[in-house]
């Protein structure tokens, strides 16, 4: 009986690894989407601009808040730095072109409920999945889109 269970687990393990690995891009997109919603609500509640920052070379992202003209790390748990899963990359596209040497890109969220237009592209995982966390106009909320621009269920 133990041999049978061991054999079944040995056969199933590679496909389970693929399932978990395949979810990494979607999970990262969901986490970034949640941070965009948090940044928008915090900006409105606190009356200050909040920023979702991306260090594309290091694969980390975090929230900051504007205080006295400078952006500083937020004090609560949501101010911590999040790391993209291994093999997942991020690019940030906004209507404003960043400086060529910019390593940290960002999206701003304003106290009036608006935000920068942006497409945050996540690519990677075992199946090379590509997802966009996008806001197509300043008054809309961010949402997850497939590259064909259809909302993801």
Image (cartoon, rainbow, N blue to C red):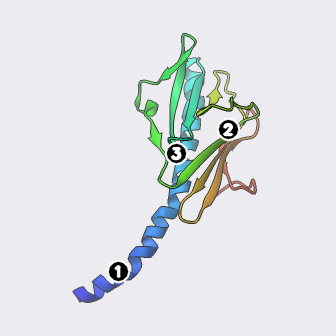
Classify the position of the C terminus by image quarter. bottom right
- Judge whether 53 appears above or below 90 on screen: above
Mark 2 to mark 3: distance in Å?
Answer: 15 Å
> Of the numbered discs in the image, which one, if any, rests on residue 141?
2
Residue identifier under label 1: 10
Q: Helix, strand or loop at disc 3? A: helix
Residue 1 percent coordinates (x, y):
23, 89
Q: Helix, strand or loop at disc 1? A: helix
Closer to the chain start, of discs 2 and 3, is 3
In this image, 46 relative to 117: left or right?
Answer: left
Residue 61 percent coordinates (x, y):
52, 37
Near mark 2 (Cα within 10 A), the count class, few <14, some 14-19 or many ≥20, is some
Near mark 3 (Cα within 10 A), the count class, few <14, some 14-19 or many ≥20, is few
Q: Helix, strand or loop at disc 2? A: loop
**Residue ID at (62%, 31%):** 102
| Rendering quarter of residue 38 | top right
In-front residue for pair 134/70: 70
Residue 92 percent coordinates (x, y):
65, 40
Mark 2 to mark 1: distance in Å?
Answer: 44 Å
Q: Residue furthest top?
A: 68
Q: How many marks?
A: 3
Front disc: 2 or 1: 1
> Of the numbered discs in the image, which one, if any, rests on residue 31?
3
Front disc: 1 or 3: 1
In this image, 86 relative to 99: left or right?
Answer: left
Closer to the chain start, of discs 2 and 1, is 1
């Amino acid at each position: 009986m133990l041999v049978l269970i061991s054999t079944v687990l040995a056969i199933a393990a590679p496909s389970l690894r693929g399932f978990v690995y395949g979810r990494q891009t979607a999970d990262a997109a969901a986490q970034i989407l949640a941070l965009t919603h948090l940044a928008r609500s915090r900006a409105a509640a606190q009356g200050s601009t909040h920023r979702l920052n991306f260090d594309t070379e290091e694969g980390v992202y975090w929230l900051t808040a504007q205080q006295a003209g400078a952006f500083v790390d937020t004090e609560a748990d949501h101010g911590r730095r999040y790391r993209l899963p291994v093999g997942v990359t991020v690019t940030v596209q906004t209507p404003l072109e960043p400086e060529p040497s910019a390593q940290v890109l960002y999206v701003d969220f304003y106290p009036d409920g608006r935000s920068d237009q942006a497409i945050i592209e996540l690519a990677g995982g075992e199946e090379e999945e590509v997802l966009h966390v996008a806001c197509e106009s300043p008054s809309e909320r961010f949402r997850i889109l497939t590259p064909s621009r259809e909302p993801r269920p």
